[in-house]
Image (spheres, rainbow, N blue to C red):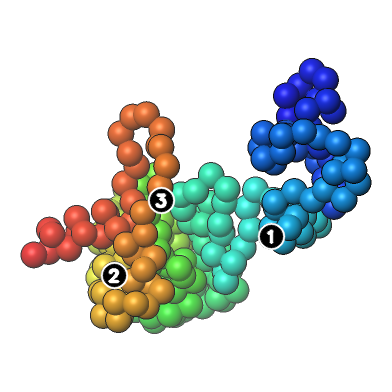
Amino acid sequence: MCGKRVKVNSVRCVKCGKWIHGRYAKIKRVTQRLARDFACGRCKNGVGRVVEQEEKLCDEVETVKECTYLGDKVSVGGGCEVAVTARARFAWVKFRECGELLYGKRFPLEMKGIVYKSCVRSALLYGSETWCLSENELGILRRTERAMVRVMCGVKLMDRKKTKDLMQMLGLKEAVDRLAKANGVRWYGHVLRREDGHVLRRALDLEVSGPRKRGKPKKTWKMQVEERVGRLG
């Protein structure tokens, strides 16, 4: 469309109703006879109909900023902070469901540690294989587990006891942040063992085209995992 006096040197498509410039439609002269049954190239090839169907479908679908897929939170801003926060809340729900055993003083601490690992920690780390963890998300995991450990041991912050000693009393050898990182490495090996044409291998090597924002690029999940694998040798 040329803007001023658009109908003089443009023709309207009878199917999609859009105005097409004469030069774009490869028409030397726009006549009334031509305008009666003119169809643009998109409508002739069926592309315009598909686009209209997609636009109609997108109008019917509700747009949200975050959603839950297979128990994991996905947000429009990217990252895993929303997912980690959601898993921490769900872990507290599981912790309270087992509260009779985890809060009780008549049960041994080793039994509490076993129940915590099987029921609570597994819920906290669900989906952690694909998390690209920053220090903020690791801090959420650490604070959540430390608070639960103090509750199970019946210890307050004023008692000034080390979390490492309390975890040894419960039989917890590894911290939750290290387990989350190890899950990523384990999933990375699982993906590499797939065939070259598998969807997971193609997704691993996928590169998004187009310009990116100025500044240092963010660390991706693949970069983090390869860095951990390099440290382990």
What count of labels does the image hold?
Answer: 3
The quarter of the picture where residue 113 lies is bottom left
Residue 42: x and y in percent read 70, 52
Residue 152 on image: x %, y %: 44, 67
**Tag 3: amino acid:** Val
Q: Which residue is mark 2?
A: 188
> Which is more toward the observer, 206 or 96?
206
Marks 3/2: CA distance? 20 Å
Q: Which residue is mark 1?
A: 45
Quarter of the image holding residue 181?
bottom left
Residue at 27% across / 54% down in the picture? 224
Q: Position of residue 143 (x, y in %)?
A: 41, 51
Where is residue 72 shown, x and y percent of the image?
54, 64
Q: Which mark is residue 218?
A: none
Residue under label 3 = 208
CA neighbours of label 1 inside 10 A, class few (<14), some (14 to 19), many (20+):
few
Q: Nearer the viewer, residue 144 or 110?
A: 144
